[in-house]
């Protein structure tokens, strides 16, 4: 059967997708470090805008985003199921999210990238703005990165 990918925007109030989002992020981003998302982590993101790609109604890629106080979009918690990595799914999700925000008048995107994902973000048009630095909370090396594009509002 042909695999159909569906791009989806959702909020934490969508219990099914948000639960899948948490499970995927824990599996990909936290378990390899011996950690899991805390109640404080989840409280911080309760108003974030989430995006995902579904395959056969299962969330296979996700990211969280929010507007900072200076009209910049902060991208966080990007995770792609290991069975779908290195197939362009993460790049597709990133492109869809940036297009969505770009059409709403946003042009600057910031994120913190783990050293293991640094090349992925460089390939997708992000540039280093600081780092590398030690993320003491997760005990990993990170980079501050940014991508600035022209807005397509209207």
Image (cartoon, helix red, strand yellow):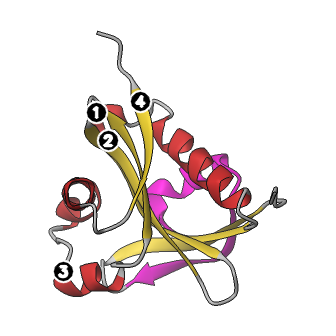
Report which residue position mark 2 lands on: 60
Cα distance, mark 4 to mark 1?
14 Å
Who's the residue at 21% across and 74% down the image?
Answer: 37
- Quarter-wise, where is residue 4 in the image? top left
Cα distance, mark 4 to mark 3?
30 Å
> Residue reaching furthest front?
154
Q: Are the two marked residues, 3 and 1, in contact with CB atoms closer than 8 angstroms?
A: no
Cα distance, mark 3 to mark 2?
22 Å
Mark 1 against mark 2, which lies toward the viewer?
2
Mark 4 or mark 2, earlier in chain? 4
Cα distance, mark 3 to mark 1?
25 Å
**58 lies left or right of 85:** left
Query: Residue 145, which numbered label?
Result: none
Tag 4 secondary structure: strand
Report which residue position mark 1 lands on: 83
Q: Residue 96: where, in percent of width, then height?
A: 59, 46
Q: Is residue 100 magenta?
A: no
Q: Nearer the viewer, residue 127 or 131?
A: 127
Residue 84 in sight from this viewpoint: yes
**How many neighbours does mark 3 have within 10 angstroms: few (below 14), some (14-19), or many (20 or more)?**
few
Who's the residue at 27% across and 29% down the image?
Answer: 56
Q: Residue 148: where, in percent of width, then height?
A: 77, 65
Mark 4 or mark 1, earlier in chain? 4
Q: Residue 123: where, in percent of width, then height?
A: 65, 46
Report which residue position mark 3 lands on: 38
Mark 4 or mark 3, earlier in chain? 4
Q: Which residues are magenta?
A: 112-135
């Amino acid at each position: 059967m042909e695999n159909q990918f569906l791009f989806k925007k959702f909020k934490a109030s969508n219990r099914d997708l948000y639960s899948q989002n948490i499970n995927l992020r824990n599996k990909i981003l936290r378990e390899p470090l011996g950690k899991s998302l805390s109640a404080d982590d989840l409280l911080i993101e309760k108003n974030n805008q989430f995006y995902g790609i579904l395959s056969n109604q299962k969330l296979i890629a996700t990211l969280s985003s929010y507007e900072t106080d200076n009209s910049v979009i902060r991208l966080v918690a990007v995770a792609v199921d290991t069975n779908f990595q290195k197939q362009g799914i993460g790049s597709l999700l990133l492109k869809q999210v940036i297009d969505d925000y770009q059409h709403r008048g946003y042009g600057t995107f910031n994120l913190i990238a783990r050293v293991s994902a640094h090349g992925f973000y460089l390939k997708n048009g992000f540039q280093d703005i600081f780092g590398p630095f030690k993320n003491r909370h997760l005990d990993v090396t990170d980079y501050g990165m940014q991508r600035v594009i022209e807005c397509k509002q209207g």
